[in-house]
Amino acid sequence: MNADPSQLSITTIRTLAMDAVQQANSGHPGMPMGCAPLAYVLFRETMRHDPAAPDWVGRDRFVLSAGHGSMLLYAALHLTGYERPTLDEIRAFRQWGSPTAGHPESFELPGVETTTGPLGQGVANGIGMALAAERLAAEFNRPGHDIVDHRIYGIVSDGDLMEGVASEASSLAGHLQLGRVTYLYDDNQITIDGSTDLAFSEDVLVRYDAYGWHTQRVEDANDLDAIRSAIKAADADPRPSLIAVRTVIGYGSPNKAGSSAAHGAPLGDDEVAATKAALDWPYEEPFHVPLEVRDHLDARERGNEQRTTWQARFDAYRDAHPDLAEEFERRVVRGELPAGWTDALPALAGKDATRKHSGKVIQALASALPELLGGSADLASSNNTDVDGGGDFSADDRSGRNLRFGVREHAMASMANGMALHGGVLPYVASFLIFTDYCRPAIRLAALMRQKVVYVMTHDSIGLGEDGPTHQPIEHLPSLRAIPGLTVLRPADGAETVAAWQVALESDGPSVLALTRQGLPDLGERPVGAVSRGAYVLRDVDGTPDVVLIGTGSEVQHCLEAADLLADDGIGARVVSMPSWERFSAQDVDYRTSVLPPQVPARVAVEAAVPFGWERWVGDHGAVIGMERFGASAPAERLFEEFGFTAENVAATAREVVDGVRSA
């Protein structure tokens, strides 16, 4: 057996991965086996991290974009001295209740910086982290006091680099010269279906050269000196870096190495044994970790020294710049909103588009919340997301408040996840609501990870008008509401828009603001905190109402007008504004029944979207006025009339519902 501690450590990473996948009878052994030398160099020698303080803000970040190789990360965390995962938790790989999930989940284990697995997401997450770090460095670093000086490292795969989101984000990273990023490319030339030649023959490094990245190639993953040298050169270059490392998937396996058979299935007991023999591994019992490996890889002493050194630098920074240090600790260390920030929220009234109301909220909050950082996918003037006088974040100016993502919706949303995960900034990103389709994988992951990202999605219905059905979202509201942990807010006027922003910024997870292109009337007074409860009574009648009209966003006005028409017929209509299903569902039953009384089964919901899901609120005797087909190209006013979003149609539908309930 090779007594070299580095090689023994690398072999231990490989055997842990083999054993865990074999015991689970599920997983991906090949990638960890091939990339074990990369993890060794990163976690033992390169990265600044302290296993005893996984959330230390001065640490380097590691992103395993190829999340299917999760055992590589679990082994690295365990062997370098993190409290978790324990060896027992590694034995329980992919099992119920174990934090060692099939793909790394940031909310399960300290040291897992982001949830990865959907390929390409980690590439963009890491780039978002680098952007956040650059912004914070511009805000807080001072001559002689570089307190924000960490880097982002990652391992990416062929599959990652095939995904469009990785291309989008990498293109922007090169444009912005986000030089804190160093990615090691697991160039093993194998995918699930076989050789990458089946679908992927481009020269990846030439492509990344064109993006403006610094690129290198290491011909053999087992050449540790070559890996060290490449990382050193990458870290010294001002550009983001991609190092293509030729690896062998399933390295050491006599019969499966270098083939797709090593990718996504256990090697099998016989092949595990044969592989261990080929690797000169003398231990028969699975999950064995030699004591000399524990000693060699233990990063706690080195990490403590690194953290202590950084803390001493920060203490000197505090002495020199006490106000900045206090602000850094609030934003970056504690992640708290400043006291009294809600005092900056404006009081908005009058007729206007809710997208414009939202823009006024952003302007009002910009000075009170310096951590608020965002932008649009080339639609800032339509989304109203620019901070006036804030400047553009660029390769030449890291102090800019406005992010220009270009036409890269998927990368934008995924980078926002990385920004939120990094901490110190509150990201908001914007496009048309229709393009949540392009953002959806990242929105879903934001909800899964419970990250505070605000999606400012305008042009929220057929009210978009003449651009026609390709740009008119109809199924998007119900599809977004189907994502657990995502708060969808569709405000009906200026006051609701202000309150929706407050809800989003106080939430523990992501929020979508669905905002109009067209102007909406002011709806007048309403109860304090009404929007935060998801739904509330906007107008009522004396006694028990005959019917409840429920609207969201631009359709609430039609409910109010319909209530007046119904009153002329002697029908008492309560009008409920329901800007957020999720917030309303979270209220106690007493509040929900006070808004939607069970003794009033006559209910009409009005929303310019597919009616899917509204049966929950209108019940068996109610009706929904919604979109049963795609829209059309015409002025918004004509579209609303043609599709029945008028006070007259709402009133007529309500009369039918009331008559049906009375005759039942």
Image (cartoon, grey):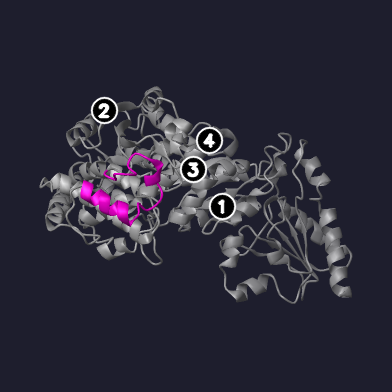
Residue type for callout 1: Val
Residue type for callout 3: Ala
Residue labelled with disc 4: 377
Residue type for callout 4: Ala
Q: Which residues are magenta?
A: 252-278
User: Against 504, is 622 above or below?
Assistant: below
Which mark's residue is nearer the viewer, 1 or 3?
Answer: 3
Q: Is residue 269 magenta?
A: yes
Q: CA distance from mark 4 to mark 2?
A: 28 Å
Give percent across and percent down for residue 583. 57, 63
Q: CA distance from mark 3 to mark 4?
A: 10 Å
Q: Quadrant of the C terminus?
A: bottom right
- Name the image quarter holding residue 466: top right
Circle 1 packing at 10 Å, graded few (<14), some (14-19), many (20+), is many
Q: Which numbered disc flags the more N-terminal residue, 1 or 4?
A: 4
Q: Is residue 627 magenta?
A: no
Identify the residue shown where x is 69% and y is 45%: 461
Residue 109 visible in image: no
Q: Which numbered disc flags the more N-terminal residue, 2 or 3?
A: 2
Q: CA distance from mark 2 to mark 3?
A: 27 Å
Helix, strand or loop at mark 4: loop
Q: Are marks 1 and 4 in contact (CB under 8 Å)?
A: no
Residue labelled with disc 1: 498
